[in-house]
Image (tube, coloured by chain):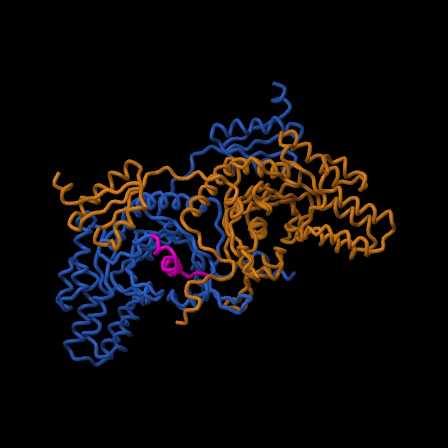
Chain colours: A orange, B blue
Amino acid sequence: MSSIKMFEKPLGMRDTFPITYEKTEEIRQIGREFLRARGFEFIQTPSLEYFDTVGKASAIYDASLFKLVDSQGNTLVLRPDMTTPIARVATSKLLKEKIPLRLSYFANVFRAQQTEGGRPAEFGQMGIEIIGDGTVFADAEVIVTAIHLIQAFGIDSFKITIGHAGVLNCILKDYTESKEQADTLRTLLVERNYVGFEEAVESFNLPKTKSDALLQFISEATNFVTIRDIEKYVRKNDALEYMQQLMELIEIADLSQYVALDFTLSSHMSYYTGMLFEVFAEGSGFALGNGGRYDGLLQHFGNEVGATGFGIRVDRLLEVVPSQGSSVQTIGLIFEEELFAKALETAHSYREEGKRVTLQSRKGLVDEEAFTKHFDNIVYVSQEDAAK
Amino acid sequence: MSSIKMFEKPLGMRDTFPITYEKTEEIRQIGREFLRARGFEFIQTPSLEYFDTVGKASAIYDASLFKLVDSQGNTLVLRPDMTTPIARVATSKLLKEKIPLRLSYFANVFRAQQTEGGRPAEFGQMGIEIIGDGTVFADAEVIVTAIHLIQAFGIDSFKITIGHAGVLNCILKDYTESKEQADTLRTLLVERNYVGFEEAVESFNLPKTKSDALLQFISEATNFVTIRDIEKYVRKNDALEYMQQLMELIEIADLSQYVALDFTLSSHMSYYTGMLFEVFAEGSGFALGNGGRYDGLLQHFGNEVGATGFGIRVDRLLEVVPSQGSSVQTIGLIFEEELFAKALETAHSYREEGKRVTLQSRKGLVDEEAFTKHFDNIVYVSQEDAAK
């Protein structure tokens, strides 16, 4: 075998070693307990889906999809998100049983990387979806749950920025002169390219009132304190009223201090039709998670019910969650080969005390000194002990 | 979008609904606690690997591999087993830190299906690997751990059949007249095709002493009670002596009643060089798991250390593990829209009592009666309550 790639892994693929594995497991357990106490039920979907169902609907950039062809000639994708498979499951089966549905997941998703830029091509996501509730209460529940979940992980310093696709669309429509212009600006906002946004506005040769309004909007929109601040840009509409209600519910839940408004928030996922939000924690430059209302996706699967949810990236959580560490004592139990029975018995009694015991024959050791330094304690089962 | 496959999943792909998810989670937790108490450390490897490294080495039939090509033109595979990726990780990094290594995993593996025959194309495996210990004690530890783990799951009725690649090879070599004949018979044993084995023996036109020996071997070999029973077929050799020692250690561990010998046991995985075994539980027609010594695989990765381990299929465990069920009380808390604050407070206090509380606005309900029947109790937060 040619060995140039003997130990290599595909671009963006990672091994998870024990310390990170256990920290991930802590996060998983905290999240599971938290979400189940709130009535969310965990489900799992397959890693592979048809491109024609989940792949096309997921709205992850096509270049980020891992595609393959099965023996029947169908194109498959490794799931690039969990929201789309869950929408498939909900509309095909679960919504017939219970409305609204509250589902949660802890699963890996896949995004192909074109260069080795340190971005993972497979990473864990934990999240929830509330499907079949179109009210503002479902959105409030999603945001309240997101905030409390982050707190449950021991993260104190974080912010949730909330916007609304409807409000942004309204502004972009009102102050541009074509759908193309509005789409261009929206794409620049998705990329967080504010300089590009300003340049594009200049290049459109809009009436001065419009271009001034857009430029002022972009300079102010990430610093709005209350919902009133947006009102000078936009006609009274349902989206605005909805946001007003949402912010009131967050106020009632006494969580306003964690929330900021950002009406430039936008998503390339066209199925985000309503409020949308991002979570930023101190210590991580990237969004920890995001969410929003995606009624459009359910329509894609032929169902007219509302849906809202959020997902948190586990790899980014690992960077900001304080580690607990394990206090369980580890014992390396080294035995002489004729004392297997005694060794089993000794190991058993230590394990009964809650200790982690590695049973190791001395005969199987290459470097005893190197081996023993991995344990809190070393216990020898030798002839002397056995004689006691 | 053409909708013929709107809700379909690729061949052999499954959704896991809450009840099965939670039972899987129980299995996962029992297994994790059990294995960590025995000094095994959990690791995770990526779902995708290079075909040239893990794909080729894994020795899963090529037709069962999910293959794709990445943007650099390299062929990738979805991991078809966990033993091979772990051998990669161990030889590239972990074995430099600690020998022997005791690693464990709980992960999905992928095997492409050609027809919708009910076989899963993605399923969970839980297992262990002891790498860097060539002694019989490591093999004994693997078998003892397998037995106790199965018992920890609450399974009482099961059997482990143990064979040895070296013993079988010796017999096949001694009683055939070419490597081709031996390979043909070994392949038939991998497929458990005993009738085919007998037919092949007849067709070889071997000297009568040889063909008689082979036919007698195949009729007796799955019913050997002690290691002595095989001695009439095979010269005294290291493999036989090794098996003698292994059975003695199992006897010392007081687990002989769970173990049977089967020297027809064979694997199409050429890296199984020593003892190998299968686990059968009552109530499942398929092997629950299997394992063995695979020193050959480590050599493939350029490392001359011994390695042994086993893996259990989670989907088959689910069929035979008695379910615990959850005794946690579920509450559907339905509130009128003006009482969000009161609802949050009520939900919080029930959750503090350890109950699972679903917070639902009445406004968001389409069919209140259908919704309420999913909970142990329904609590209404209405104006009357609030007035109290």
Inspect the magenta stretch and tell me whether residue B217 lies in it: no
Judged from this view, the residue extending furthest toward the top is: B388
Q: Residue furthest front?
A: A369
Look at 22% across and 77% down and name the residue there: B202
Seen at 27% across and 51% down, the residue is B158
- Left or right for A302, reference B163: right
Residue furthest to the bottom: B205
Please state the extent of the stretch shown in magenta in the rendering: B78-97
In the image, residue A64 above or below residue A275: below
Q: Is residue B383 positioned above or below A354 on the image?
A: above
Q: Which residue is more in the foreground, B60 or B336?
A: B60
Q: Position of residue B256 (x, y in %)?
A: 19, 51
Quadrant of image for the C terminus of chain A: top left
In percent of width and height, residue A211 lies at 83, 49
The one nearer the camera, B255 or A216, is A216
**Which quadrant of the view contains residue B209?**
bottom left
Residue B42 x %, y %? 38, 49
On screen, residue A385 versus residue A295, left or right, reads: left
Q: Is residue A74 left or right of residue A370?
A: right
Q: Nearer the viewer, residue B91 or B169?
A: B91
Secondary structure predominantly adopted by residues drawn in magenta:
helix
The x and y percentages for residue B268 are 33, 67
Tally of numbered tags: 0
Using the image, determine if residue B137 lies above or below residue B303: above
Report the side of A147 relative to A1 (left or right). Answer: right
Q: Quadrant of the N terminus of chain A?
A: bottom left
